[in-house]
């Protein structure tokens, strides 16, 4: 089987609405690029040439072509949805930590589900895990009667790479394959809010390969007992045409094996919605097993299933709506050997922490730093609460529009503090220059208060501003200067600006009432 190997980078912030978790007043986004979104991009692009599209349409919508989900890449690796079935103790640990597998042994009391983020990558006995960087902004919706409501919108931050692929059966003509590949030769837009600057992406790689990705993780030999991992949401239909989740009878036929038995599983379910643009309406929803679910299956008579049949079923997928990327599976070799979890961005430090010969000095040092950081954050929060009351922001002479811009920048970029600081200072300088020019023409009073406030908060020492005289002091034996990074301090400054503006707005409304 051929497949088009894709690596997509979101040049701008990306929002693909998640109908399952979004509520009134807030829109959540998916943390991946769905296969249906990639299919929509391909269909929309190819429809520009109606004659060619009519020839390809039947193949593009058939089960001979699968548009798979695109998941986050980390350190050049294709991540997969975080695996279910792991538990850990309740002690905090930022480095390498031992986890237990519920599919291998019963879990005792005092354990909780292991936090593995949204994505993971198995590597020997370790699971590297992480999540896509997310952001959010607040908008004001002005209704027809002048009523204003605030709503929150979530998005994936720009500059992240996602790996996906499109499989083609060997019966699909080369002309169709090359036409699909051509779609990804330039930048494109996907997702929601495109006219608001969201959704711009570019294709980093689009190469035609043989086989199927994740080959290093898949079963390479015959097995009578195996683990099936869902790489996307999945639901099968039974012989009566009803949705049945996992139908072992059909699965055994697809694997050409003796009857199968489900030994254990770690799974969750999700209701999947959809929309048909041709019908201009929603399609019937379906309950599916969620991506990351794991099933431990074995043959009833102990006979082995051929590795060739594993590979063939992985290429074809199982269940409904495979053309949209659902039913993507992997027969995982090594699930029962996983024993530790490591944050993907902390891999080197975490490995060092557990591999020290003899004592555990570095582990203890790391734990002290974590405790010191938590205590420092707690003290800063209390100091910020006092500061809001004792040093209220005076809004007289400052326009609501400028306050709104400052608040919007802080909210939108609070997870990218350095970028937020640059935009804030740039906005302050531009607005000050504009006001000075206006003053010479119409005599308007300069709004120096806002400029001085932004510059002072971002440039001056935060601890001194909050009255926390911590210079040359230590917290739990850790120097204060080493507890929080420069970026974390900058993030707390942005939070202080947000809280001060909100507090000042509440004061204004209270006096108005």
Image (cartoon, rainbow, N blue to C red):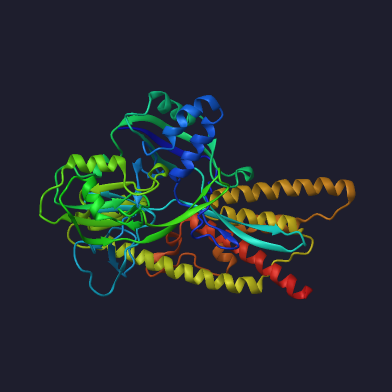
Q: Nearer the viewer, residue 404 or 202?
A: 202
Give x and y (percent) for residue 403: 70, 58
Give x and y (percent) for residue 484: 45, 60
Q: Nearer the viewer, residue 38 or 12?
A: 38
Query: Seen in the image, is 136 located left or right of residue 9?
Result: right
Viewport quadrant of the N terminus: top left
Does residue 459 show up?
A: no
Q: Quadrant of residue 395?
A: bottom right
Residue at 15% from the left image edge and 46% from the top image edge: 305
* Number of disc labels: 0
Q: Residue furthest front?
A: 240
Viewport quadrant of the C terminus: bottom right
Does residue 57 show up?
A: yes
Q: Nearer the viewer, residue 513 or 95?
A: 513
Q: Reply above or below: 48 against 73.
A: above
Q: Reply above or below: 175 against 474.
A: above
Query: Seen in the image, is 46 located left or right of residue 433?
Result: left
Q: Residue furthest right?
A: 442
Give x and y (percent) for residue 125: 22, 53
Q: Nearer the viewer, residue 105 or 463?
A: 105
Residue at 27% from the left image edge and 50% from the top image edge: 122
Give x and y (percent) for residue 86: 28, 62
Q: Quadrant of residue 215?
A: top left
Q: Reply above or below: 312 against 84.
A: above
């Amino acid at each position: 089987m051929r497949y088009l190997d894709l690596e997509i980078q979101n040049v701008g912030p990306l929002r693909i609405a998640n109908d399952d978790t979004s509520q009134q007043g807030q829109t959540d986004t998916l943390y991946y690029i769905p296969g249906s979104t990639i299919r929509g991009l391909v269909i929309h692009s190819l429809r520009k040439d109606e004659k060619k599209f009519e020839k390809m349409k039947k193949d593009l919508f058939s089960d001979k072509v699968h548009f798979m989900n695109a998941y986050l890449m980390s350190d050049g690796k294709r991540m997969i949805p975080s695996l279910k079935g792991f538990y850990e103790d309740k002690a905090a640990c930022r480095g390498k930590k031992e986890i237990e597998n519920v599919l291998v042994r019963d879990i005792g009391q005092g354990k909780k589900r292991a936090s593995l983020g949204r994505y993971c990558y198995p590597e020997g006995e370790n699971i590297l895990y992480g999540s896509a960087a997310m952001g959010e902004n607040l908008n004001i919706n002005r209704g027809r009667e002048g009523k204003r409501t605030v709503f929150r919108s979530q998005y994936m931050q720009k500059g992240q790479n996602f790996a996906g692929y499109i499989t083609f059966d060997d019966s699909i003509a080369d002309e169709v394959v090359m036409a699909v590949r051509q779609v990804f030769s330039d930048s494109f837009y996907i997702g929601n809010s495109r006219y608001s600057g969201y959704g711009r992406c570019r294709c980093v790689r689009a190469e035609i390969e043989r086989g199927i990705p994740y080959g290093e993780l898949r079963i390479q030999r015959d097995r009578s007992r195996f683990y099936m991992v869902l790489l996307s949401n999945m639901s099968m239909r039974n012989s009566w045409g009803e949705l049945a989740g996992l139908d072992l009878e059909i699965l055994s036929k697809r694997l050409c094996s003796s009857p199968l038995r489900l030994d254990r599983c770690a799974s969750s379910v999700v209701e999947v919605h959809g929309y048909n643009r041709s019908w201009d309406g929603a399609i019937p929803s379906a309950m599916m097993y969620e991506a990351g679910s794991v099933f431990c299956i074995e043959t009833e008579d102990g006979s082995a299933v051929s590795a060739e049949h594993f590979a063939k079923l992985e290429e074809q997928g199982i269940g409904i709506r495979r053309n949209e990327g659902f039913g993507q599976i992997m027969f995982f070799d090594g699930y029962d050997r996983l024993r530790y979890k490591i944050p993907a961005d902390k891999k080197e430090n975490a490995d060092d922490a557990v591999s020290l010969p003899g004592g555990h000095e570095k582990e203890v040092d790391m734990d002290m730093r974590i405790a010191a950081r938590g205590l420092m954050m707690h003290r800063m929060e209390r100091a910020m609460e006092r500061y809001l009351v004792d040093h209220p922001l005076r809004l007289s002479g400052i326009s609501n529009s400028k306050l709104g811009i400052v608040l919007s920048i802080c909210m939108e970029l609070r997870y990218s503090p350095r970028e937020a600081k640059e935009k804030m200072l740039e906005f302050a300088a531009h607005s000050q220059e504009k006001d000075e020019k206006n003053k010479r023409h119409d005599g308007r009073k300069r709004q120096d208060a806002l400029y001085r406030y932004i510059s002072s908060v971002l440039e001056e020492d935060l601890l001194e501003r909050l009255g926390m005289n911590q210079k040359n002091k230590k917290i739990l034996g850790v120097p204060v200067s080493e507890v929080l990074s420069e970026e974390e301090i900058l993030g707390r400054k942005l939070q202080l600006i947000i809280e001060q503006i909100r507090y000042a707005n509440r004061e204004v409304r209270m006096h108005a009432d």
